Image: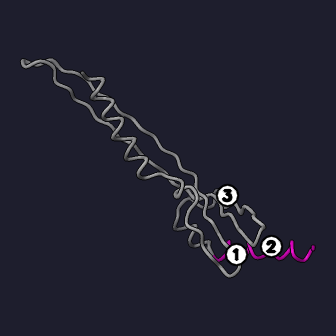
Amino acid sequence: MSENNIKAIIDVTMDKIRALVDADVVTGTPIEVGNLTLIPVSRVSFGMASGGSDFPSKNGQLFGGGGGAGVTVVPIAFMVVNGENVKMLPIYNEVTSLEKAITMAPEIIEKAKELFSKKENKE
């Protein structure tokens, strides 16, 4: 009996994680800046735990259980698209939150422009 109950807890927990984390979280919504397109890239990690137990009672067995999960999303880079050219612009460990990534956006745009202007000058 408890095997089905634990499976139900795990199924519900996994459904909630699937609802939170999909491909759109790893690669965010593209941002258009002039002729450049910036695509945020994030590292997603999650953990999950669940458990339960049967307890004897006067009316048979009672089940008690629970589950939980946690998800962490950390921005790590931007893919910079300029026409057919695509470059990865890492954010490194300086960024630990989305707020810092947004704060760095002007600097990232300038780096992306420099990256492609150097290539165009070489050609």
- Give the main secondary structure of the magenta stretch: helix
Span highlighted in magenta in the image: 106-123
Q: Between disc 2 and disc 3, whose residue precedes?
A: 3
Q: Amino acid at mark 3?
A: Tyr
Does residue 69 show up magenta in the picture? no
Query: Position of 4 compared to 15: left or right?
Result: left
Across and down, in percent, residue 98 comes to 52, 64
Quadrant assignment for the C terminus = bottom right
Quadrant assignment for the N terminus = top left
Query: Position of 18 compared to 1: left or right?
Result: right
How far apart marks 1 and 2 lie (CA) works out to 10 Å
Q: Residue drawn 71% across and 63% down?
A: 89
Q: Residue drawn 48% across and 44% down?
A: 46
Q: Amino acid at mark 2?
A: Phe
Number of marks: 3
> Dot 1 corresponds to which residue?
36
Which corner quadrant of the image does residue 117 belong to? bottom right
How far apart marks 2 and 3 lie (CA) works out to 20 Å
> Dot 2 corresponds to which residue?
116
Q: Amino acid at mark 1?
A: Leu
> Dot 3 corresponds to which residue?
92
Q: Residue drawn 35% across and 37% down?
A: 11
Across and down, in percent, residue 78 comes to 66, 64
